[in-house]
Image (cartoon, rainbow, N blue to C red):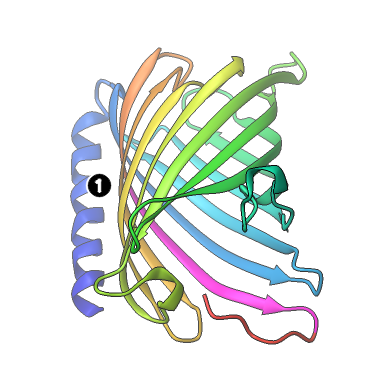
Amino acid sequence: MIRVLLLFSLIVFNLEVKAQDSLVNQDISVNSQLWLDYNFSNEFKNGKNLQTQIGFRKIFPDVFNRFLVISTLEIPHEKSLKFLNLNKPIIKTFHFGSGLIYTQNNDFKDNLEFRLFQGFKFDIPTVKAITLNNYVRLEERFQNNFSNSGWTAGYRFRYKLSTILVYKKHLSNFVDGFYIPLSAEVFFNLKKSDRYNDLIRLEPGLGYKLKNNWKFELYLIFNETKNNTATNNSSSDFILRLRVFNGIIKTASKEPQIE
């Protein structure tokens, strides 16, 4: 763990040095970013789960800082399609959520976004040790850039394909140790917003899970996005992301479940 922290510090320092070299031209068509977020969940007796993320994101060169709070209500789906003779439902969970994202810009006015979204997850079983997780989501984005133009609305469709690799263990029996989360995600705008529209994201990562359900994940992310700022039509983003999960807080008496 100490080696991982030292490596993390070295990468952050390297990003800051490169950022200083880029400040002169403010060329952010290719940039580096640092994302940090803390995640916690509350599980209710009816199986519903409220997930909350508190995050901070910074871009190099020094163009903006972003603060976000996003909560998602996860509702399990247990009905299967009987006419297809399926033992398990195709859709695993439905998701409803909202979030606030505040972007503190250096060279132009700040941006506040209020976001609503609805989605669902379903799995595609492949070999025994690998399951492909699918997440489909529709977002309604309302933004205000404090320029007396009021609120603008945008709508976006997202699709994410992900899996988790665990060495010599099936995911259903995995309790603790290292694992490899992998995902790819595409964003399609049905109506463009003022900031941060169509996007392709690749997320390879490395995670470690403790027996008490705390998890730590480190990602090296690549984004290819359109309309990243008011002065650029597109950009390539290289992102270092650290995620911390504190497991599930039981809000009602319930037998613990093995993940």
Q: Residue at x 71, y 61 (%)?
A: 50
Q: Is residue 209 left or right of residue 53?
A: left
Residue 235 position in % (x across, y down): 34, 22
Q: Residue at x 42, y 13 (%)?
A: 231
Q: Where is the N terminus found, in terms of image quarters?
A: bottom left
Chain part drawn in magenta: 240-252
Quadrant in the picture for residue 117: top right
Q: Is residue 109 magenta?
A: no
Q: Nearer the viewer, residue 85 or 49?
A: 85
Residue 234 position in % (x across, y down): 37, 17
Q: Residue at x 64, y 85 (%)?
A: 256
Q: Is residue 85 left or right of residue 75?
A: left
Quadrant in the picture for residue 158: top right
Q: Secondary structure at mark 1?
A: helix
Residue 112 position in % (x across, y down): 66, 33
The crowd level at tag 1 (other Cα within 10 Å; few <14, some 14-19, many 20+) is some
Q: Nearer the viewer, residue 59 or 92?
A: 92
Q: Residue 141, relative to residue 176: is it above or below?
A: above
Q: Is residue 28 visible?
A: yes
In the picture of the structure, the residue carrying the numbered disc 1 is: 16
Q: Residue at x 31, y 56 (%)?
A: 205
* Dot 1 amino acid type: Glu
Q: Residue 223, relative to residue 70: is it above or below?
A: above
Q: Is residue 250 magenta?
A: yes
Q: Main secondary structure of the magenta part?
A: strand
Question: How many marks can you see?
Answer: 1
Q: Is residue 196 visible?
A: no
